[in-house]
Structure formats: structure tokens, C-alpha cells
Image: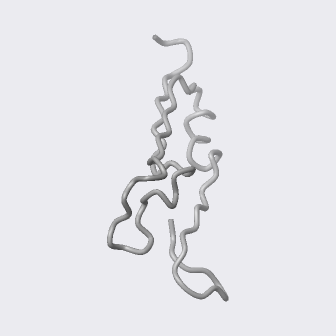
Amino acid sequence: MRWGAWRREGLHSSFHRSLETLLGVGLRAGFVIDGLEERAFPPDHPAGKNPLSWGGAFSEIPPVMVVRMRLAGRV
């Protein structure tokens, strides 16, 4: 995540990594995804003191994605 952007005033968040970037190396090496979890905070979650804190303002965007990958053919 990076903060700010060209010709934009004020702070805002930017999400810039594709799933291909995050998972591609493992998938190309023969791993498979056998578990994926994304949890978002509820809309009424209290915001922190930072104006960009992950409170209810981002309730539709999970702050964390957890992926379990295993080598194909193995239990």
C-alpha cells in the first residue's frame, strides 16, 4: 500500500498488487491453492487515530488475505 498519488490532494490509499503478482510464482511452480480467507472489518468498527486507519470506512475491503498453497498431488 502506498499513500498519495500524483496530482491528488490529501491522503488516500492505493492497492496495487495483482493476484498474479502475489500468487503467480507458486502457481507456476506447481502449487495449488487449497485455502483462502479474506476478512473485513464490519462497517461499525471504530476507526483509529490515523486518518487512513482501517476502520469501518473500508468495510468492503479486507485488510488481509491469507492463502494456503500446497504442492499439487500432495496431501
Q: How is the image coloured?
A: one colour
Q: Furthest residue to the left?
A: 49
Residue 25 x %, y % = 58, 41
Residue at x-position 58% and y-position 32%: 29
* Front one among 14 and 51: 51
Residue at x-position 46% and y-position 47%: 42
Q: Quadrant of residue 52?
A: bottom left
Residue 67 x %, y % = 48, 35
Residue 34 x %, y % = 53, 22
* Front one among 51 and 8: 51
Q: Decide if residue 10 is on the left or right side of residue 54.
A: right
Task: Establish if 51 lies above or below 1.
Answer: below
Residue 17 x %, y % = 60, 56
Task: Establish if 35 lies above or below 57.
Answer: above
Residue at x-position 48% and y-position 45%: 40
* Front one among 1 and 42: 42
Task: Establish if 1 lies above or below 71.
Answer: below
* Front one among 51 and 35: 51
Please tell me how many numbered marks the rendered image carries: 0
Q: Quadrant of residue 72?
A: top right
Task: Establish if 60 lies above or below 75.
Answer: below
Residue at x-position 62% and y-position 41%: 24
